[in-house]
Amino acid sequence: MTTVGTVQVPRRWSVAMRVTTGAAMVAIVVMLVVDATHIDVLGWVLAVVMLLACGLSWMILAPIGCARYREYRAVAVAPVVVIAGLGLVWFGVPEKVGWWISAGAMTDAAQSCRESEEEWFGVIRTDRVRSSDGGCQFTIDDMAIVGGLAYFPPGTPPPDHGGAGYQPVYTPYDGNWHRFEVTMHDHP
């Protein structure tokens, strides 16, 4: 037991709060890595389930720690970690850092556009690389959409397929790079 003022904090409460905070930190790290590397949407699901479990545990432990043991610092750590991590994800910091690390390798690969499957470029994992629409497409399939990043040589704009179904829709990303997603139905 540790002592706070004149009240002793039971070891089991301290361990439970540390485990809750540690699990929340792991979940946030998983979210940051998945966001930076585009590994898999399953990582997001795992992280969200972990955060929900940590939140439930924290909602039980926090009132006990504050009311009975006056352990405000230990109680505050988990929410600060979660808010900071989610803030980084919200503002796209992991994706920007992942792109910053990977842009050179992806640009080099795009200029030769050698077809391949299941390859890493920097920290970004692609499912497929292929030449298409006058550029080079790097498919990053996250199970929610079929899409990824496409490189078009300088002076070559991406084509506009007029909203036709099963055709890529390109949006600017960074310089000669564009995001693309394949729509499954026609758009007016």
Image (spheres, helix red, strand yellow):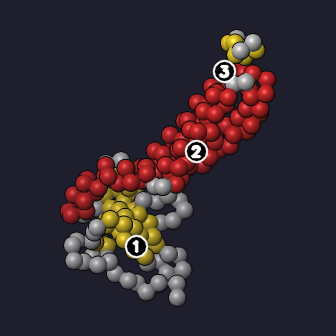
Q: Judge whether residue 43 can be spotted in this image.
A: no
Of tags 3 and 2, the one toward the viewer is: 2
User: In the picture provided, is 29 more to the left or to the right than 179?
Assistant: right
Q: Residues within 10 Å of mark 3 (few under 14, many from 20)?
A: few
Kind of residue indicated by mark 2: Ile
**Residue 46 in the image, given as x and y percentages of width and height:** 59, 44
Q: Which mark is residue 15?
A: 3
Element assignment for label 1: strand
Between 171 and 122, the residue placed more toward the observer is 171
Kind of residue indicated by mark 3: Val
Would you name the residue on which mark 2 appears? 83
Q: How many marks do you count on the picture?
A: 3
Q: Which mark is residue 171?
A: 1
Q: Are marks 1 and 2 in contact (CB under 8 Å)?
A: no
**Residue 81 in the image, given as x and y percentages of width and height:** 56, 38
Q: Quadrant of the N terminus?
A: top right
The alpha-carbon separation of the residues under discs 3 and 2 comes to 22 Å
| Residue projecting furthest to the front | 5
Instruction: Identify the residue shown where x is 50% and y is 40%.
Output: 29
Q: Judge whether residue 140 can be spotted in this image.
A: yes
